[in-house]
Amino acid sequence: MILSESPEANRFIAKVDREAQRLSVQLLFSLRDDVMALDNREATDGYFTPPDDDSPGLLVVPIGRQEQEWLHTLAHEYVHMCQWFREDEVWMKWRSYNCDSNYYRLEEATEHEACEIIMKYKLPCGNAPKRAASYLRRLKRNSGSKPLAVE
C-alpha cells in the first residue's frame, strides 16, 4: 500500500496494516478530510473501534488533508489500537467510565506515545509535538480537565 512519497511513511503504513490484520482490525483510508465516527456520528479526524464478536474493528483515517496531519492521525489511532490490545490502564479506565477527565487523560497519553512513534519511524509529520499540544489545549478548554503527567 503506497500512500506517500516517503519510504518511512509507507513502511509505517504497512506495519500498521499488518498489525491491524493480526488483531482483526480493518485499516481504512478515506479520501475526505474527515470521517463520521461510529459512536456519536460526528465528524472527526479519525477513529479506532475495537473488534467484537460480530464484526472486525476499524482504524479509519481520512487522507484528504495534508500528509503530515493524516500521518499524525494514523500514529494516534494506531496508539489507540495498541492501548486496546495491551489493555492499557488509561484505555480501560476511559472504556469503563467515559467522562471528560478520563477522555482527556487518554488523549494526552495517546498524543505522547504518538509523538514518540512519529520520531521513532521518522514520519514526515512536521512539528508533531506542537500539533499535539494544540490539540490537547483545545480538549482541555472543552473539558476543564487537569492534565495527566506523562513521562
Image (cartoon, rainbow, N blue to C red):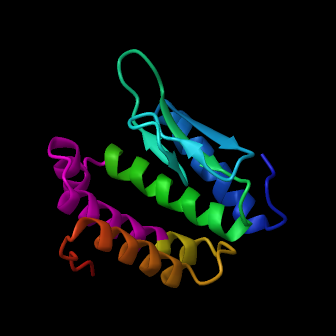
Horizontal and vertical percent position of residue 92: 20, 47
Horizontal and vertical percent position of residue 35: 59, 44
Image quarter for residue 74?
A: bottom right
Foreground: 61 or 101?
Answer: 101
**Above or below: residue 147 compared with residue 53:** below
Residue at x 21% of width, y 71% of height:
144
Q: In which quarter of the image is the N terminus?
A: top right
Residue at x 45% of width, y 43% of height:
48
Give yes or no for residue 118 being in the magenta stretch: no
Horizontal and vertical percent position of residue 88: 25, 53
Horizontal and vertical percent position of residue 131: 52, 78
Image quarter for residue 26?
A: top right
Q: Is the magenta stretch mostly helix, strand or loop?
A: helix
Q: In which quarter of the image is the C terminus?
A: bottom left
**Above or below: residue 30 compared with residue 138:** above
Residue at x 47% of width, y 43% of height:
42
Give yes or no for residue 97 being in the magenta stretch: yes
